[in-house]
Image (tube, rainbow, N blue to C red):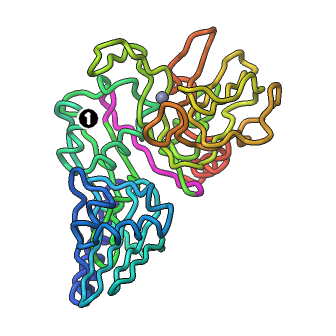
């Protein structure tokens, strides 16, 4: 199985390489790296846009204000006499923008890139931290954290991973106009935990998807995941010390990083016990479930209109949208679980997929 996959991957990469060399001659775009401290405005400045032109770009489309650029992505520049075109790709979402300066006219609009995608496979062993060992093989925070996301529900911490443990994964590389611009999804992973390899596969669902293996269906946990794309920005840390004040600042939930507007689902049948807005949590909802446990959802962009005190919701029913209200710097869902009056680590109580994906995943297992 592994050998079979590896040969498919290398054939794919070879086929792609020849495609790339054919395209290279006709290609007029240059790929430039996003550097530390870069943002849309500094990139525009570096590429000859005056202050007035930069303002025109920002005013063209409100999505440009949310464009998120990380160091492992590139943008494209094409320059001809009197014309400069930039193509920029959001690191987190599929959003892309084409920014054109032609004479004195400046336009900036979203567009759909025609990505060519190749797959690469990375193999390694763990020495020091797991995250550091992956970063040593591929210099991309996105890719390394996606790999970690595959095992969020399998490990409380990376102490279960022995020194020298083997890992491998495949990851998409996305090319636009013949140039590498960003990494896509990590698709298959393997990590030796307690001496045996645990493999996961990314199963797509709508815009998102989850990391999964057959074992995950057997886990007897009371809740489903409340989102369709599981990317963890911060885990449950009851004893977290603030790095500067050195004061105890516990994180009593898990943060799922998702773009503004992504749907949030009830993870189990329950009733709404409270909802509203406060300074820290922003827009929030609290559900009480039939097993006596409570779940909380903070920083919502919107609470669904139907939500009322005492309203009964089913597993998988939409209750709100991810946002960044309250104390928040980047859009995410802070999800917390309370059991017998105490906050507990959500990953021990939730399955690694939302309810609407269960049948799809069961079918995958049955067909293997
Ligand atoms: Zn949080």
Q: Is residue 151 above or below residue 345?
A: below
Q: Residues within 10 Å of mark 1 (few under 14, many from 20)?
A: many
Which residue is under mark 1? 130
Asked if residue 200 lies in the magenta stretch, the reply is yes
- 180 vs 257, left or right, is left
Residue 65 drawn above or below residue 281: below
10 vs 112, left or right, is left
Q: Secondary structure at mark 1?
A: helix
Q: Is residue 126 magenta?
A: no
> Magenta-highlighted stretch: main secondary structure?
strand
Q: Position of residue 130 (x, y in %)?
A: 26, 35
* Residue 3, x across and y down, in percent: 31, 57
Residue 354 in picture, x, y percent from top left: 62, 41
Q: Nearer the viewer, residue 355 or 254?
A: 254
Q: Is mark 1 within 8 Å of ligand 1?
A: no
Residue at x-position 17% and y-position 33%: 127
Magenta segment, which residues? 192-206
Q: Position of residue 190 (x, y in %)?
A: 35, 43
Query: Could you say which is closer to the camera, residue 125 or residue 262?
Result: 262
Question: In front here: 308 or 199?
Answer: 308
Front in this rendered view, residue 291 or 34 = 34
Q: Residue at x 63, y 46 (%)?
A: 263
């Amino acid at each position: 199985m592994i050998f079979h996959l590896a040969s498919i991957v290398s054939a794919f990469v070879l086929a792609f390489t020849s495609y790339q060399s054919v395209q290279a001659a006709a290609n007029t775009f240059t790929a430039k790296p996003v550097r530390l401290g870069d943002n849309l405005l500094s990139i525009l400045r570096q590429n000859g846009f005056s202050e007035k032109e930069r303002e025109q770009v920002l005013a063209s489309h409100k999505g440009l204000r949310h464009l998120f650029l990380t160091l492992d992505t590139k943008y494209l520049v094409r320059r001809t006499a009197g014309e400069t075109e930039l193509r920029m790709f959001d690191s987190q979402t599929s959003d892309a923008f084409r920014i054109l300066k032609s004479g004195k006219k400046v336009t900036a609009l979203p567009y759909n890139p025609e990505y060519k995608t190749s797959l690469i496979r990375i193999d390694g062993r763990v020495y020091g931290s797991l995250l550091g060992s992956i970063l040593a093989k591929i210099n991309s925070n996105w890719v390394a954290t996606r790999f970690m996301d595959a095992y969020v529900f399998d490990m409380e911490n990376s102490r279960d991973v022995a020194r020298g443990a083997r890992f491998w994964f495949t990851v998409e590389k996305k090319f636009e106009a013949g140039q590498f611009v960003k990494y896509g999804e990590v698709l298959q992973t393997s990590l030796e935990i307690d001496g045996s390899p645990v493999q996961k596969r990314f199963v797509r669902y709508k815009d998102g998807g989850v990391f999964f293996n057959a074992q995950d269906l057997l886990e007897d946990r009371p809740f489903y995941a409340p989102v369709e794309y599981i990317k963890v920005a911060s885990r449950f840390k009851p004893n977290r010390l603030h790095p500067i004040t050195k004061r105890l600042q516990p994180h009593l939930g898990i943060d799922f990083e998702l773009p503004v507007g992504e749907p949030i689902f009830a993870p189990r049948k329950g009733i709404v016990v409270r909802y509203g807005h406060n300074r820290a949590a922003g827009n929030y909802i609290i559900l009480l479930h039939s097993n006596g446990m409570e779940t909380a959802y903070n920083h919502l962009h919107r609470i669904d209109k139907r939500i009322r005190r005492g309203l009964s919701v089913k597993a998988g029913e939409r209750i709100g949208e991810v946002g960044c209200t309250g104390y928040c710097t980047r859009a995410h869902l802070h999800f917390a679980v309370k059991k017998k009056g105490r906050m507990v680590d959500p990953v021990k109580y939730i399955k690694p997929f939302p309810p609407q994906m269960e049948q799809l995943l069961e079918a995958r297992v049955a067909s293997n």
